[in-house]
Image (cartoon, rainbow, N blue to C red):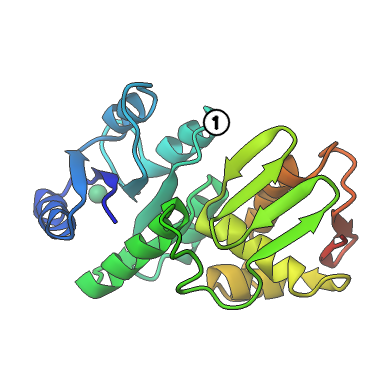
Amino acid sequence: MKARILVVEDEAHIAEGLQFNLEAEGHEVEVVADGARAVELLSDPDRRFDLVILDLMLPVMNGFEVARRTRAAGNYVAILILTAKDDASDVVRGLEEGADDYLTKPFRLDELLARVKGLLRRRRWDGVAGEEQEGLRELCFGEVRVRFDRFEIETPRGVASLTTREMGLLRALVEREGEAVTRGDLLEDVWGLRPDTKTRVIDSFIVRLRRYVEVDPSRPRHIVSVRGHGYRFVR
Ligand code: CA
């Protein structure tokens, strides 16, 4: 599936390699080398990207700030961050700022392409939805219809397109309907992080999910907090 991808990377040889390989996969690729330019392109209403590959250490404005500003502007384009190896705190901070997934440098090409494919899956409209999905494809509760196969949520307010991790988190809760699921389990299941990682990433994603599924996100009825433990999904 063709996508428009923005690569934000200041190391020219990495940027060129990404562009070459993503274009070989049929994608349209634009490359910028600093964070401020990335924010400029991402806030341009005439451009629309399906995915951003975002290095964290960048001139002018770093990748954390790019992710933060992008989300603050209400732009939920899929974001894949690139981090230096063994820097778990950068991964966590990047996810907290709104990134969907991460890859550590140096990365293997096949791994990168697999992540890109995973992040673009939600954009699929072609009816073969569900091809790589297992289990539940659709769920209705209240005035909400979740299309796991399309990465969409329909409510009377409209249709929202979810990122891979938003959908993964919702799926993890729904699959254990009625059970209190710990933050540690969710970190491990949905993000592949160690369950004892200190982060508020789960909580910020819960805020995002509640905005989609709750009539009044400040008084959630479906994604309920379990004090000192985690979250519970209630139909
Ligand atoms: Ca860099």
Quarter of the figure that contains the N terminus: bottom left
Image position of 4 (left or right of 139): left
| Residue 155 in the image, given as x and y percentages of width and height | 73, 41
In the image, 59 versus 122, the foreground residue is 122
| Residue 41 in the image, given as x and y percentages of width and height | 30, 27
Image position of 79 (left or right of 166): left
Image position of 235 (left or right of 78): right
| Residue 152 in the image, given as x and y percentages of width and height | 59, 50
Dividing the picture into quarters, in which one does residue 7 lie?
A: top left
| Residue 171 in the image, given as x and y percentages of width and height | 67, 66
Q: Residue at x 34, y 38 (%)?
A: 49
Dividing the picture into quarters, in which one does residue 156 lie?
A: top right
Residue 84 seen: no
Residue 211 seen: yes
Q: Is residue 82 above or below residue 177?
A: above
Quarter of the figure that contains the C terminus: bottom right
Q: Is residue 177 above or below residue 55?
A: below
In the image, 1 versus 203, the foreground residue is 1
Q: Secondary structure at mark 1?
A: loop
Image position of 29 (left or right of 125): left
Residue type, numbered disc 1 = Gly
Q: Residue at x 60, y 61 (%)?
A: 148
In the image, 198 versus 189, the foreground residue is 189
Q: Residue at x 87, y 46 (%)?
A: 220
Exactly how many numbered labels are in the figure?
A: 1
Q: Residue at x 27, y 45 (%)?
A: 5
Query: For the view shown, which residue lies furthest in the top direction?
Result: 45
Which residue is denoted by mark 1 in the rendering?
74
